[in-house]
Image: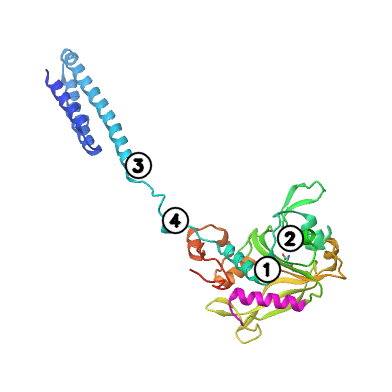
């Protein structure tokens, strides 16, 4: 046997015995590497006469081919073995309790919606819902805004190109007020509901996003008056902000679907650059902030849903959920609500186990 044959057999045996990718790489450098013996042997061919080269070349070439093939095969085998070992090592124990690694959190908007439902349920209100894709009859006409009403233009409505089978415009609801209409049509009077949900307007800056959240309130019964409205809102805000010194101011305003209409202001003070709800807005260091619209349901609206205004009347209100969430939990940029940033959610989010209840508290944070 020639030297090359002996050397090749030794190399092939070593490759077969290699037990790691590192050991295999060392063998590759020893043989096919720049200074490996196969490479050096190939180099000697250049200095040979043509006859010598013809005699020596085949043995070196086939040694190189055999070693290269053995290296490739062994590398593939070692990689497969390593992957198998990793798969065996990195098993997931599905029997571990989920609490071991809590990841998700409840968005403050969802939490506040749960708080609203809890507080209003205690006052005898049911939670009603309606579609986010509405038609203009429910969103506008039945709320006393006919086609020519200027308030329609004020809503920056997103319209769809198609119409309903009745020929109505299709749109993304601009407020939760159409749920008033749907609820009264479905169940008549008396009625006591809140309707939290998403609403849409073509508007976007630091304090406006194209999608935001409102909660609608509606009470229709016999002998309902503005005093009931003020008491209800006051009672709600005291429970929501968990303080007794909530002072509301009702200011005359205009909405097509209420008559009379009022805007609701709440007294607050500035503490460390943050608005803190509480106290009389005219007291020193205090001011008023608008937090919603409301009023006595317009008789025209009652007629649209087939109720007799001589028999029934009631009040309605609409509040911005994002706004009251910011006031309660201290965020200052509305847009961050909808960025889906994990750090923001980890900071402002709630534990799924922290269900708001009147007994434990509607603001308790785990
Ligand atoms: N729908 C009104 C808006 O989005 C808010 C509102 C005002 C709702 C007065 C009401 C109400 O129910 O009575 O601007």
Q: Main secondary structure of the magenta part?
A: helix
Q: Which residues, given as a range, are shown in magenta? A: 226-244
Disc number lying in front (1 or 4):
4
Q: Earlier in the sequence, mark 3 or mark 1?
A: 3
Q: Residues within 10 Å of mark 1 (few under 14, many from 20)?
A: many
Disc number lying in front (1 or 2):
2
Q: Secondary structure at mark 4?
A: helix
- Real-space Cα separation, disc 1 to disc 2, in angstroms: 14 Å
Q: Secondary structure at mark 2?
A: helix
In this rendering, is residue 31 above or below 56? below
Q: Within the image, what quadrant is residue 196 found in?
A: bottom right
Left or right: 57 with respect to 166? left
Q: Which residue is mark 4?
A: 98
- Real-space Cα separation, disc 1 to disc 4, in angstroms: 37 Å
Residue 352's x, y, as percent? 51, 62
- Real-space Cα separation, disc 2 to disc 3, in angstroms: 54 Å
Q: Which residue is mark 3?
A: 87
Q: Within the image, what quadrant is residue 138 found in?
A: bottom right
Q: Which residue is mark 1?
A: 319
Q: Residues within 10 Å of mark 2 (few under 14, many from 20)?
A: many
Q: Is mark 3 within 8 Å of ligand 1?
A: no
- Real-space Cα separation, disc 4 to disc 2, in angstroms: 38 Å
In-front residue for pair 42/23: 23
Q: Earlier in the sequence, mark 1 or mark 2?
A: 2
Q: Secondary structure at mark 3?
A: helix
Q: Give the residue drawn at x 18%, y 32%.
A: 30
């Amino acid at each position: 046997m020639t030297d090359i044959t002996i050397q090749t057999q030794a190399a092939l045996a070593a490759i077969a015995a290699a037990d790691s990718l590192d050991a295999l790489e060392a063998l590759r450098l020893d043989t096919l590497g720049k200074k490996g013996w196969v490479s050096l042997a190939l180099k000697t061919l250049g200095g040979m006469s043509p006859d010598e080269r013809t005699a020596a070349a085949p043995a070196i070439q086939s040694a190189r081919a055999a070693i290269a093939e053995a290296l490739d095969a062994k590398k593939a085998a070692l990689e497969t073995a390593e992957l198998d070992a990793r798969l065996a090592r990195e098993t997931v124990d599905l029997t571990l309790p989920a609490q071991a690694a809590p990841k998700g959190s409840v968005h403050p908007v969802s939490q506040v919606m749960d708080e609203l439902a809890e507080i209003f349920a205690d006052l005898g209100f049911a939670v009603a819902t309606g579609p986010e894709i509405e038609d203009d009859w429910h969103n506008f006409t039945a709320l006393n805004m006919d086609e020519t009403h200027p308030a329609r233009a004020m809503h920056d409505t997103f319209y769809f190109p198609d119409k309903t089978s009745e020929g109505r415009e299709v749109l993304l609801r601009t407020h939760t007020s159409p749920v008033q209409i749907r609820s009264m049509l479905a169940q008549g009077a008396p009625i006591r509901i809140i309707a939290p949900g998403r609403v849409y307007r073509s508007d976007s800056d630091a304090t406006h996003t194209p999608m935001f959240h409102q909660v609608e309130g509606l009470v229709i019964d016999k002998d309902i008056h503005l005093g009931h409205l003020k008491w209800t809102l006051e009672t709600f805000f005291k429970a929501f902000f968990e303080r007794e010194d909530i002072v509301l101011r009702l200011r005359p305003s205009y909405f097509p679907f209420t008559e009379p209409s009022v805007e609701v202001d709440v007294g607050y003070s500035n503490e460390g650059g943050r608005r803190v709800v509480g106290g009389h807005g005219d007291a020193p260091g205090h001011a008023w902030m608008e937090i919603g619209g409301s009023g006595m349901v317009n008789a025209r609206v009652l007629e649209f849903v087939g109720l007799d205004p001589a028999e029934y009347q009631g009040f309605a209100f609409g509040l911005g959920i994002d706004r009251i969430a910011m006031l309660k939990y201290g965020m200052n940029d509305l847009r961050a609500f909808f960025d889906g940033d994990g750090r923001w959610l980890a900071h402002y989010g709630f534990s799924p186990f922290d269900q708001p209840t009147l007994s434990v508290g509607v603001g308790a944070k785990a």
